[in-house]
Image (cartoon, grey):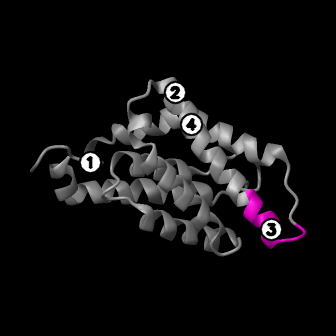
Amino acid sequence: MKSLLNNMSSYRGIFLSLLIAFILNMTPLRSNPLLPDFVLIVLVFWILYFPETVNLLTAFLLGLFMDVQSSNLLGINALGYIIAGFLIVFWNRRILSASPIWQVINIFQVVLLVHISIAITMWILVPSFVFSSLDIFLPATFEALLWPLIKRLLVNQGPFISRNKP
């Protein structure tokens, strides 16, 4: 793992995957509750597997970028990504040692708490904000179901992350 962190191509792979997730979040259908937060899932993966490289500061900055991009209240996504990052760091061993099905359940718990915290914060700060349980559970469910695919894609990045020293 140390050779991975010393290799500049690893940073390129992390940056590229987060950039692709950010671009996927900029789709015009973003208001559709069925669309998952791709940045959140990719961020959860990188914090889970490389907490030294992608940390809570990265989560905060990506959250601010998402707030600016989505014209949301500044700090709402940053708060959600920080909560996700903290829970992933806190449950790191629990998630990594779990079977794939339990990993999906654990990721569902994390993203559900993120969506609940964002909805409650928006409800407190914006009096006219109305949300339904579907706005919370549907994205969390799709993000959790997307976890095995994202995990497989990011673990097998091939040329973007070299696990051997050059």
Residue found at the very far left of the displayed protein: 166
Inspect this view and state whether residue 104 appears.
yes
Q: Specify the amino acid type for callout 1.
A: Ile
Where is residue 47 drawn, in percent x and y? 41, 52
154 or 116: nearer the eye? 116
109 or 139: nearer the eye? 109
Q: Magenta span has 143?
A: no
The relative height of residue 103 versus residue 122 in the rendered view (above or below) is: above
Q: Which mark is residue 161?
A: 1
Read off the magenta span. 119-128
For marks 3 and 2, give the CA distance. 33 Å
Q: Which mark is residue 146?
A: 4
- Pointer 1: residues within 10 angstroms few (<14), some, or many (20+)? many
Q: Main secondary structure of the magenta part?
A: helix
Where is residue 3 drawn, in percent x and y? 15, 50
Q: Specify the amino acid type for callout 3.
A: Ile
For marks 4 and 2, give the CA distance. 14 Å
Q: Specify the amino acid type for callout 2.
A: Trp
Tell me the element at label 3.
Answer: helix
**For this view, does 133 lie left or right of residue 3?**
right
**For this view, does 81 lie left or right of residue 119?**
left
**For this view, does 48 lie left or right of residue 123?**
left
Q: Which mark is residue 102?
A: 2
Q: Residue at x 44, y 63 (%)?
A: 56
